[in-house]
Amino acid sequence: MNTHHASCSASALPAVASSDAVPGPRCATCGAVTSRLTYFKTRSSNRNGNAGRPYLKCMICNKFVTFTDCRGINNDAPRCVCGLLSRQQIAGRMGTRTPRGLHYVCSLGQCEFYQARTNAQGEQQVLAEHLIDLFAKLNVI
Ligand SMILES: [Zn+2]
Ligand SMILES: [Zn+2]
């Protein structure tokens, strides 16, 4: 199962291909590589625009690692610590500091990169509830 990002644009991949770096998602906490991670799919009842989305979880850490699709990986995204285009996501409605806040994370889940998407005033941008499904369909998030 090394087909992650197969359908993503090449710009999502590292600028310099390195043969000694193991490509692919990796647990940022324990370093487990893709073959040690477990594939899941989000529930169809997911309310974050993430219904039926494939993702990897580290069973050792009991922790979500990354989505394995191309959603949210856009050319205007900042680069994460790995040098990859980061993935734009939206925070949940509850239990987060900025509900529905847009933010960027490592597209492979292998570094702890986090950056809020901010407006000209430096405030985190929040997506209106009724736009979430549309943005998800357009692969913006
Ligand atoms: Zn782990
Ligand atoms: Zn990264």
Image (tube, helix red, strand yellow):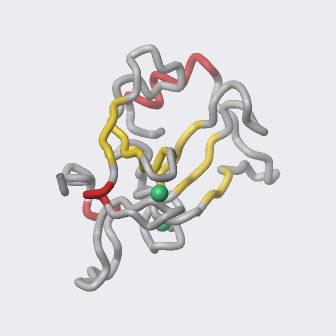
Q: Quadrant of residue 31?
A: bottom left
Residue found farthest to the front: 60
* Residue 56, percent from left and from top: 37, 45
The residue under the point 25% across, 53% down is 4
Please state which of residues 139 and 24 is positioned toward the viewer in this rendering.
Answer: 24
* Residue 21, percent from left and from top: 31, 80
Q: Is residue 5 visible?
A: yes
Q: Is 118 left or right of 63, judged from the image as shown?
A: right
Q: Is 131 left or right of 119, judged from the image as shown?
A: left
The residue under the point 76% across, 52% down is 120
Please state which of residues 77 and 101 is positioned toward the viewer in this rendering.
Answer: 101
Tell how many labels: 0
Q: Is residue 76 visible?
A: no
Please state which of residues 57 and 122 is positioned toward the viewer in this rendering.
Answer: 57
Q: Quadrant of residue 36?
A: bottom left
* Residue 35, percent from left and from top: 25, 57
The residue under the point 45% across, 50% down is 65
Q: Is 123 left or right of 21, judged from the image as shown?
A: right
On screen, 68 above or below 135?
below
On screen, 52 above or below 33?
above
Q: Quadrant of residue 75?
A: bottom left
Please state which of residues 81 and 72 is positioned toward the viewer in this rendering.
Answer: 81
* Residue 49, percent from left and from top: 47, 25
